[in-house]
Amino acid sequence: MNTLRVFRNIPQPNKIRGQLHRALILITFIIGLCIFIPTLFIEFRQTIQHQNEEMVNYLNAQTYFFKSWLKERSSDIHTIANLDFVKGYHYEKAQAFFQDFKDKTDFTDLIFVNKDGIVQFDTVTELTTNGTGVNVQNREYFQIAKKTQQPYITDIFISKITNQPIVAFASPILNEQQEFNGVVFGTVNVQIINQYLHESRVGFLGHAYIMNQNGMMLTELNVRNNDSSSEQFIVDEHILDFAVNNTANDLHVYKDMNGKWVFAKSKPINQGKWFIISEIGLFDALKPLIIRFLLIAICIVIGSFFTIRVMLQLSKKIEEPIQQLLTGVGKIQQGNYDYQINEHQLAPYAQEFQELCSSFNDMSTKVRQDTILLKELSITCQLTKLYNRRYLIEQGELVFEKCLEDANACSCIAIDIDFFKKVNDTYGHLIGDEVLKHVANIISNSVRRVDLITRYGGEEFVILSPDTTIESAIKIAERVRENVEANPYTNDHLKINVTVSIGIAEYGQTSDVSTFYELLDKADQALYIAKESGRNQLRVYDSTKVGTNI
């Protein structure tokens, strides 16, 4: 029974794995022991180089991530500090905005500090203001923000409000005279930074942590397991010295905080105030190398006398179908998504190549279908099934330029549903969406096939009518307005009367419109006048009198 089990585990002749196993045995036997030592040396160097590159790539990725994350959080606070209601000390509006913004971001707390260093309010909880009235004038972030009038990221410190270790992102509030008028700062719990670092550790066998210039760790990924005291957050002196003075690109070897020998690399972040260190145990790093050497030794011992010709023939069997696949990949890269590999040509080759060929053909078909679908999704409003604003901008210029070349008129009709916000507020957004689809359907059935209908945004629609004078555009617009008014939205439970306001602009011989964007803007101006004049009416743009009555 054991013998039968062994034979079942031998790779089948038509499998790539079986062919390569036999070829490797042949080659290793021919090469023999005379190249084992050079191979050992080369493999060792390549393993070290690979490990170095992997850790460099990991550090670069982590550095890029944290730089981006720090920049984004700092930018968030800087943006908040420049809001008008923040600069104007509108506390009620600012506090509501701070609470809403905090709930959507990584910030643990957002604090408004006046120019005297007194906390006006914070967002520790929704219903309490534990930090209100706290004096933070002596805090580093307040002093630096006041002195430099620039955004600032602090080192780790203990919050006076939450008594938790945090990092603060501060930005000064400047009044109209660009004078210091307070500070907005957001705090991030150290646990959040640790969580991000842990979640981004994908495909890396070692661990990483961040520390500041004093050797205090900002994150902790089981670096020290022997106790839970606060001293575990201070790294050993030789690790701190390595991080601060590390200038070489080679791997460093030292004992980590658990006394285990590791490979290590470090990189500064946050303008050199922090260091990110990655470590991997020597055995973990060299384990693949040890396994490879054992396999090589076994292959040399059990190898026998075979010729290189067998390997050349095998290489040919592998190379030809791979070349077919590479040709197919090249065709796909060039945009030829209809390309298919002839599966019958690969029939003499290994079963894996045949399966790979079939998978490639399936992929090519799916890519072609997905490309068509993505193109449709990118230019279509999925709610109303009309073209979207992006399509209008892309195609509108082409249509307008064609009218210019042919010296034909071109009209633009801007439509806005009257009091649509009231519909949403009264009946909810689901009914509002149904009203939008209802109006879109009416507009589609009220215009010509040559007209380009788009949902411009929200409750606004735009119709671009090529080769259309203002008189014809007025007829189209009036037909749309009347049809919308005459056909209220109804369902089993309710009836909603809907009207629209419409603005019209034309490019023609006597028009002051010279570009598509101007035409769109003039139609929007006329729409604004229509809405201001009472809604449910048309207005035509006139360069001498905007919003002329119909």
Image: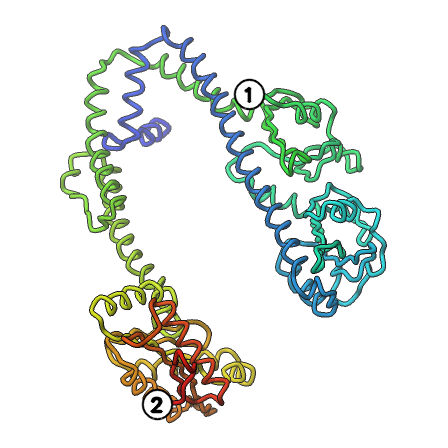
Query: Front-most of 73 and 284?
Result: 73
Q: From the viewer's perspective, is residue 199 above or below residue 245?
A: below
Q: Position of residue 133 (x, y in %)?
A: 85, 60
Q: Residue furthest left?
A: 344
Q: From the viewer's perspective, is residue 203 above or below residue 368?
A: above
> Mark 2 and mark 1 in contact (Cβ < 8 Å)?
no
Describe residue 42's horizontal placement relative to residue 245 as left or right.
left
Query: Front-most of 13 and 209?
Result: 209
Q: Position of residue 361 (x, y in %)?
A: 23, 48
Residue at 66%, 59% (x, y): give it.
102
Q: Which mark is residue 250?
A: 1
Looking at the picture, which amino acid does disc 2 mark? Asn
**Image quarter in which the N terminus is found:** top left
Callout 1 secondary element: loop
**Image quarter in which the C terminus is found:** bottom left
Residue at 70%, 62% (x, y): give it.
87
Residue at 45%, 20% (x, y): give it.
46
Q: Circle 2 sits on which residue?
A: 483
Describe residue 468's horizontal placement relative to residue 268 as left or right.
left
Q: Position of residue 482 (x, y in %)?
A: 36, 91
Query: Front-most of 511 and 204?
Result: 511
Query: Which sits earlier in the primary sequence, circle 1 or circle 2?
Result: 1
- Please identify the quarter of the rendering in which residue 216 is found: top right
Q: Residues within 10 Å of mark 1 (few under 14, many from 20)?
A: some
Describe residue 422's horizontal placement relative to residue 169 as left or right.
left
Q: Residue furthest top?
A: 34
Q: Residues within 10 Å of mark 2 (few under 14, many from 20)?
A: some
Q: CA distance from mark 1 to mark 2?
A: 75 Å
Q: Which mark is residue 32?
A: none
Q: Position of residue 275 (x, y in %)?
A: 65, 33
Looking at the picture, which amino acid does disc 1 mark? Asp
